[in-house]
Image (tube, rainbow, N blue to C red):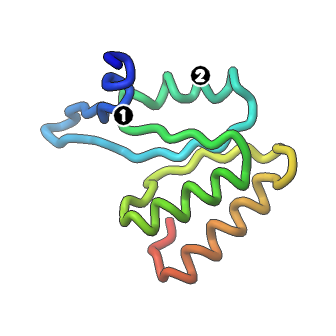
Amino acid sequence: MFLKKIYSIIIIIKYKNEVINIKFLLIEDNYVNAKLMQKMLAPYGEVDTATNGLEGITMYNESINKLSLYEIIFLDIMMPNINGFQVLKEIRELEERYELEKY
């Protein structure tokens, strides 16, 4: 239970007197790569991880519905079932459908 609470805490850091808390979506099918990226990104905010493209699209869509959008998405290109290019296309279509600002 204790570890579960620790993992649910959003990590916040201070940079130039501003609180930085970035919401990341990591879409990566390789377990080792995903763990490495999570460890690197964790000091800068919340990292949600999808293990395949379909899961990533679902998580992005849910973030829209919850009005808690991801600020940065890290996307693997070579994944089974649906590749990164297809995932990006779906994400862009969701942005257009919901009239979200693109970066």
Task: Name the side, left or right, on which 54 lies relative to 5.
Answer: right
Residue 1 x/y as whole percent: 35, 19
- In percent of width and height, residue 38 lies at 52, 28
Mark 1 → mark 2, Cα distance in angstroms: 14 Å
Query: Does residue 67 appear left or right of residue 96 in this picture?
Result: left
* Mark 1 touches mark 2? (CB < 8 Å): no
Residue to which mark 1 is pinned: 44
At 61% across and 59% down in the image, what residue appears? Answer: 58
Q: Position of residue 39 (x, y in %)?
A: 49, 22
* Above or below, 65 relative to 76: below
Q: Is residue 1 above or below residue 47?
A: above
Depth order, front residue of 64/72: 64
Q: Which mark is residue 58?
A: none
Residue placed under numbered mark 2 in the picture: 36
| Residue appearing at x 60%, y 45% in the figure | 74
User: Which amino acid type corresponds to the residue marked 2 in the rendered image?
Assistant: Leu
Q: In which quarter of the image is residue 57?
A: bottom right
Residue 86 as seen in the image, left or right of residue 63: right
Residue 29 placement (x, y as % from top left): 74, 36
Q: Quadrant of residue 33?
A: top right
